[in-house]
Image (tube, rainbow, N blue to C red):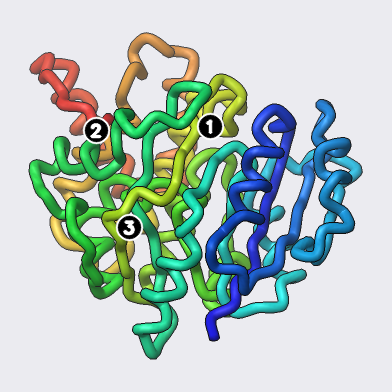
Amino acid sequence: MIQFSIIIPNYNHSKYLRERIESVINQSYQNFEIIILDDASTDNSREVIENYRTHAKVKAIIYNETNTGLQSLQWIKGIEAASFDWIWVAESDDIAEPNFLNDAAAEIGNQNKAVIYYTDSYHMKSAEKDPSQVKFSSMKGNYFNTGHWNINYSEDGIVEIDTYMKYVCTINNVSCCVVPKKEALDVLYQFPHMIFYNDWLFYIQMLERCPVVYSASCQNWYRIHQESHFSTRGTGLIKRKECFNILCYLYKAPYITGKNQLVRFFTEQYLGIGIWKERKYIVPLFAFCLKRSPAVFLKFLTHLLVIKITRKKIKYIF
């Protein structure tokens, strides 16, 4: 029987935390344990969390005394405390539908190997759940001009990376995903800690080890708000540096095709967007990229100058 360890990492999401925990506890599939982590929140998250200390499903509650600001460190801590072989990192500001784990268990049970399982998600911008809100399958399908995410599918991990994942993190967010514990720790123990794009690189490295299984059923609500991790921390320089690191990782990978096209895509969608309006970042970004990979930097710089000179209009992903 499939058993899940559910990691709920939290930082200052007290207003969403109860709804998140309840959406986990009330899953129709009940073979799971819960591990709650708090990264030294300054709101009343601890008060909310303590209400669940004696709940039968809660295996552990772990508090940090100082804030790390790094999701991957929290993931490692939670997964190390896990008893079971399948991990669901349920971010503290998202919401799960009651059948998320039931569907995951059914799909995983059909496999005789470690897989990455994920579902479609709603892009939740309102305070309440509203099924009329945009689905990630529609957003991705519109950009790539495909119905790929409208139906269930399974795919070899390397093929998935080279077809879609090399361009954008097509696994919508960590809350919609279940991963095998052993492979997740293998990746995370060697992981370069990132602030913004750690999930993208994590999935790339997981897909190098495992095939992917996708459900077109919307079983996750990805909440967009001003206090979200991606919205509140760091600067455009940090984001661009992290994107360049991912680009270099992909560029070096032997299975990646169309590498010059990939550099152009990263230049248009990540590295170059708004750079001429944020001139203070140009010199430190160029210095970082040149040191990281002179060959990739030269291609990036060439594409950047072509875009500026030709005033090329860019079709952005989202």
Residue drawn at (71%, 62%) of the image: 34
Residue drawn at (65%, 70%) of the image: 32
Amino acid under disc 1: Phe
* Disc 2, SS: loop
Amino acid under disc 2: Ile
Disc 1 marks which residue?
Answer: 230
Left or right of residue 279, residue 180 in this image: right
Q: Which is nearer the N-term, disc 2 or disc 1?
A: 1
Q: Count the marks: how many?
A: 3
Q: Residue 133, position in %: x, y?
A: 33, 29
Q: Residue 159, position in %: x, y?
A: 21, 69
- Residue 297 can be seen in this image: yes
Residue drawn at (72%, 37%) of the image: 11
* Disc 1, SS: helix
Residue drawn at (16%, 48%) of the image: 260
Residue 35: which numbered mark, if any? none
Residue 317: which numbered mark, if any? 2
Left or right of residue 102, residue 163 in this image: left
Residue 250: which numbered mark, if any? 3
